[in-house]
Image: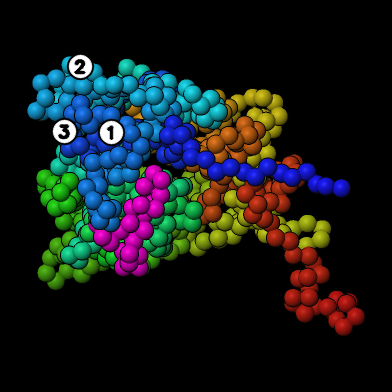
Amino acid sequence: MTATAKPLPTIRQLPPNLVNKIAAGEVIERPASVVKELLENSVDAGAFRVEVTINGGGTELIRISDDGCGMTTEQLPLAVASHATSKLPDEEALFHVHTLGFRGEALASIGSVSQLTIRSRTVADDCGSEINVRGGVIESPTPCGCPVGTVMEIRNLFFNTPVRHRFLKTAQTERGHIVEAFTRIALANPDKHFVLTSNDKTLYDLAPTTRWSDRIAEFFGGEIADSLIPIESDDSQIRVSGYACDPSVSRGNNRMQYMFLNGRHIRDRSLQHALTEAYRGLLMVGRHPVCFLRMEMPADMVDVNVHPTKLEVRFTDGGRVYGRLLQTLRYQFLKTNMTHRVGPASTPQTDTDSSGGTQSSDVVAPAPSVLGLPSRVEAEQRQGVINWARTGESPSMPASLSPTSSMPAGASPASTSQSMPSMSVPGFRPFPGNAPFPANPLPAGGAPGNGDAAAGAAVPPTDPATGEPAERAPWDPQPATSDGNPTVCYLGFQVHNRYLVTQDEKGMVVIDQHALHERVLYERVKDKVLGGSERLESQRLLVPEPVSLTPAERTAALDSKETLAKIGIEIDDFGGETILIQSYPAMLKRMSPGDMLRTVLESVMSAGKEPDAQDLLNHLLSTIACKAAVKAGDPLTREEITSLLEQRDLYQDTHHCPHGRPTALFFSRDELDRMFGRLGPRGRAKG
């Protein structure tokens, strides 16, 4: 029996058009890839003004015009040919690349999957030239009228590769990717004028600037711009400059880490690790720093020919680059006061211009004291608070406010304090029980008085007839305790303002108040939203709050608009990268709407490209429950403790919070007896 012989495979040369389509699969992933490649060409051509116009998320139209050097009629056919470029004059130049592009395959790949039109003119030519490429078929150049520079139009992207076209997302999502590509190029070149228009609406019109912080502020708003810490280091070969953000401004992912190497945006794991190490101890677990860093080094120290889109690079001495970045950041952090600031900083900030030099901003005059104190006195008070935050020690009263500072000669401190009203600021008391009450606190009305009249709400009411303490009504405020005694109710009591201790018939239970309250809130909102198809109660904002987002965050917000509305967050597009918050969950009283929106969007973006709507909504509800629950350190009243412990038995799975942490630890009576040695050899309790 003879087996059927298989025909031998035949090796054949692929036609150029198919080669370009294969290359397009690597280089042209989506419309944003086209924008990136053409913007890099404009920058390499020496353009000063670059305009980008898109329609339909880039699939219908991408037009990029610049005022660069342009191309002659003879060069146009070569420009759209495969592996033809003007950026590598010889073979040795591949190892000393000084331009953003160098492979010469971008235009050929774009022309093979779209309808491409190029108009270009040089300064020496009287008129321009035009060339058309339709699905890889190159037509002959023709004369045309156009200004000096180049205009490229790409229409109907992926019209001849329907499989690739089906893998594209919505126009809104593709627009977000284009804005991100535009952002990277515009950040790397602040000395150039960039304009981005989408569907006849101008999104960005960025005038050239010498201050990199101005370009950053135009993209990311005042919150990021106000928290920038200048970074500058130069060891004659590796230069690091730019900004790292204050640890108070962080994100749930690393998308806000912009690193540029010789003007090229890169993503490098070792450099990201160095950035994370520099912030170690300054950020909470799961948070990522925000940075805008530029590195410059000789071209022979880096290989950029290791990735099809040139996003990844390889260093000849990666350890040295890693150490330089880590050392620079840590040294700058040591010189900077990293104490969390409430409100904008009043100290002048050193800025880094686009050329890498430093320049000082205008000196800001100190704001008037909100306490009506001299600036020197208020500075002493502020420094005392900072010292307490660093050491935990209660600060002493400034000498300028001390009762003995202006005492007459021969007078004792006691007699002086009795003869004159107290004009001192009460001693700083961060937490109950950590420091004594001030000797002469201000009364409830705010006017100075002696110690007996200034007891305020802390003094229990007295019977005017007998002078004895009167019986306290249930609605009277609870007296403030300075000894830190726990709040006790009939079901249990609170310890350290974070744990609840209760008992049942089998033993003792220690409960994490935050974890239990989070589970209770989660079950309540889940039953309402997922079970009854309702929405969370929301509070309509009197004045809608604008929130500046990154392009990716804005796209995620608009794509999830209906889901956000179910959890009580109603948003509208304000234009640019700004979102308006119209309403806000009523249960989140202590968190700003902008911060909550960013937290929710981090969950949305981490859910993947096509998250299940039910799973996403479930995850968002757990996030809201976590933010709305009582925190460790929050003192609870008797009524609040009773209510929380009573609700523990009303829901299922209250033994764990929605994130998996246990809500309670159980100590059986036998286990307690065993710990205290009350069980005999035969397991009987000793009397």
Where is residue 285 drawn, in percent x and y? 49, 56
Q: Can residue 599 be found in the magenta stretch?
A: no
Amino acid type of disc 3? Cys
Name the residue carrying label 1.
78
Dots 1, 2 in contact, CB < 8 A:
no
Q: In this image, 174 relative to 190: left or right?
A: right
In front here: 325 or 70? 70
Magenta residues, start to end: 299-323
Task: Calculate the distance from the C-alpha at mark 1 to the C-alpha at mark 2.
Answer: 18 Å
Q: Which of marks 3 and 2 precedes in the sequence? A: 3
Residue visible at 23% across and 67% down? 413
Where is 299 relative to 21, above or below? below
The residue that mark 2 highlights is 144
Work out how far the residue at label 2 is from the one at label 3, CA to CA, in angstroms: 17 Å
Q: Mark 1 or mark 3: which is in front?
A: 1
> Disc 1 or 2, which lies upstream in sequence?
1
Location of residue 608 in the rendering, given as x and y in whole percent from the top left corner: 55, 39
Whether residue 619 appears in this view of the structure is yes
The foreground one among 47 and 284 is 47
Mark 1 vs mark 3: which is more N-terminal?
A: 3
Report crowding for label 3: few under 14, some 14 to 19, many 20 or more residues within 10 A (C-alpha): some
| Kind of residue indicated by mark 1 | Leu
Q: How crowded is mark 1: few (under 14 residues within 10 Å), some or many (20 or more)?
A: some
The residue drawn where x is 81% and y is 70% is 670
Q: Is mark 1 on a helix, strand or loop?
A: helix
Q: Please identify the residue farthest to the bottom as the structure is shown.
A: 681
